[in-house]
Image (tube, grey):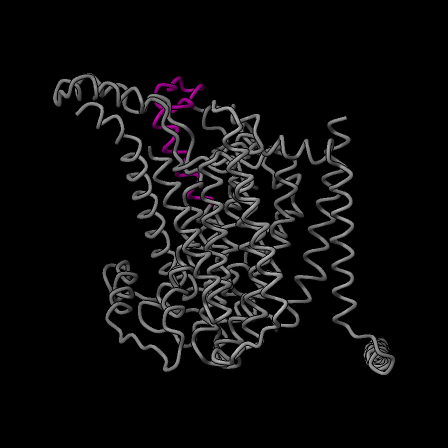
Amino acid sequence: MASNVLFFLFAGFAIACAISMVYHKNPLYSAVSLVGVFIALSCIYITLAAPFIAAVQVLIYAGAIMVLVVFVIMLLNMDDDKPLSRLRYLYAVGGGLGLILLAQTFFIFYAVMRTPKHAVNADETAGNTLSIGTAMYTEYLLPVEIVGVLLLMAIIGGVILVRRFDPGHLKLVVDNELERRHEEDEKDDFRIAL
Amino acid sequence: MESVLKTAFPFIVTAAAIGAAFGGVMMVVAYTVLAERKVLGWIQGRIGPNRVGPWGLFQPFADLIKFIFKEDLTPDKSTKFVYFLAPLVALTCALLPMVVYPFGPQIADPLGWLVPYVAGITYVGDATVWIAEQARNMPLTIARIDVGVLFVLGITSVGVYGIALAGWSSNSKYSLMGGLRSSAQMISYELAMGASVLGVVMLAGTLDLKGIIYAQINSPFRWFIIPQFIGFMVFLIAAFAETNRVPFDLPEAETELVAGFHTEYSALKFALFFMAEYVNMFTVSVMCAVLFLGGWYVPGLDYIARFFGVQWLFGVGTIGYALISHAGFIFKICLFLFFYIWVRGTLPRFRFDQLMNFGWKFLLPVALANVILTIVVVYFLNS
């Protein structure tokens, strides 16, 4: 009973936040609504006896990724009332993705109906931290390693892209650095001389 | 009647526990503010507040009343809804971790001796006896989540939104820059904080706060502050930055930075940010005590009880044991809170680039090195 009430509460909150995310003109409101969706989802995970996934959902998505998104939106300082010019083919892409999402939803309904209805031992499900860890570092070790290397590449790529190593700029950076070191050395020499 | 009572009982217990914990935390916060003003006064050779009540004891309430009755200004052209939402987010996220704090050990049979009397006085069928049976094993925590450490870290990381949104919605450049500064600081030091906790989690083998305490019990030499001293130092420093305290208290720099995210906030909304900061101090003190100082464990208490033969009073599982353990827990927290105030009276402030360099180029590498060291040690200990 109580779990049903909680489910509808959090699911309703998630859907409301999702709708507000899509329909808000202001990107910051959309971002905050998305955070609301994540938090509602993590509450649902807790009611499903998967506290690890719930905590990670909040920690990674709400606490790290969306904070960066909010940062970018705050720094860009976009105008609210500027009409957004959209390309025509985006509608087609959006429609296609929507159809795929709808198919996925129906597949989930189908899969849920197919599964036998009986209580599962909570320790054997994906909610258990130990079972997640064991699975990640034994059965799925290779995918985990591949994802780790991919993420590392993405980080390095991000740093490289942001740094803009055109020759003139690079020379300036190197010169400044050399000058700074030189000054520090001089300071040290001065101290030694004293 | 009986079935209603049985259904409602867990909810009533939880609600009572939340009420008690909330009241307790808020009282601790109120008196931390007073203690801060007093101790800072002593450090600077002053007396501190001493007018309201004996020894200034009612000062926090006077402050609160003043905050409530001040004029509540909303800056023109601010984003109203977000402007109202931000302090609420900050305080909610500060208070939420309260549900997983292990306030004390489990009490076995808390008021078992009361059962016959209560049942005799208020006879509601078997329900009274049933309730007494249910209360046999009373844990002194509101909700036990298997991933308590992650829960606390996750909720604290959501608290960044309060600060970022406050800075953005105020429609002031100083606020915006202050909000960006503070949230960048919190995100940076969160990494070092999380990495410093990993060592403890590896040694204890669990993410559960209660399990971490039980891994350190029986002797003060098993406290994780000894094998994880580097982790403890990193955690402590990162905690100072996470709570925006001296020496990382850039929002307090009124003269040189025009304060920070809360520049445009006044009256009760400012008070909410202020309270959130002190509740966050309480949270990191609790985490410090639980992760590194054995939580509620008071060294030697069960030995003393056995030695004097008063186990019925202070033995493991009795109310006396729980009360003393709880007092020990509060004492450890107060130790850290005092340390905060002491540091505030001692150290100057970091500049922002120094703060960022320190966080990313020193604290995070040290925390990661500690993690790798712990991995190696744990591997060889287990093999």
Residue at position x 69%, y 36% in the image: A136
- Where residue B216 sits, quadrant-wise, is top right
Instruction: Answer with left or right where residue B170 lies relative to residue B178.
Output: left
Residue A124 image position (x, y, % from top left): 57, 25
Residue B167 image position (x, y, % from top left): 47, 72
Residue A189 image position (x, y, % from top left): 86, 78
Q: Which residues are magenta?
A: B305-332
Q: Is residue B317 magenta?
A: yes
Instruction: Answer with left or right where residue B54 lies relative to residue B346.
Output: left
Residue B358 drawn above or below residue A59: below
Residue B201 image position (x, y, % from top left): 61, 38
Res. A187 visible in picture: no
Instruction: Answer with left or right where residue A102 lies relative to residue B105.
Output: right
Residue at position x 48%, y 66% in the image: B163
Res. B85 visible in picture: yes
Which one is in front, B48 or B81? B81
Which one is in front, B354 or A74? A74
Residue at position x 53%, y 46% in the image: B288
Magenta: main secondary structure equals: helix
Residue B362 drawn above or below residue A167: above
Q: Quadrant of the C terminus of chain B?
A: top right
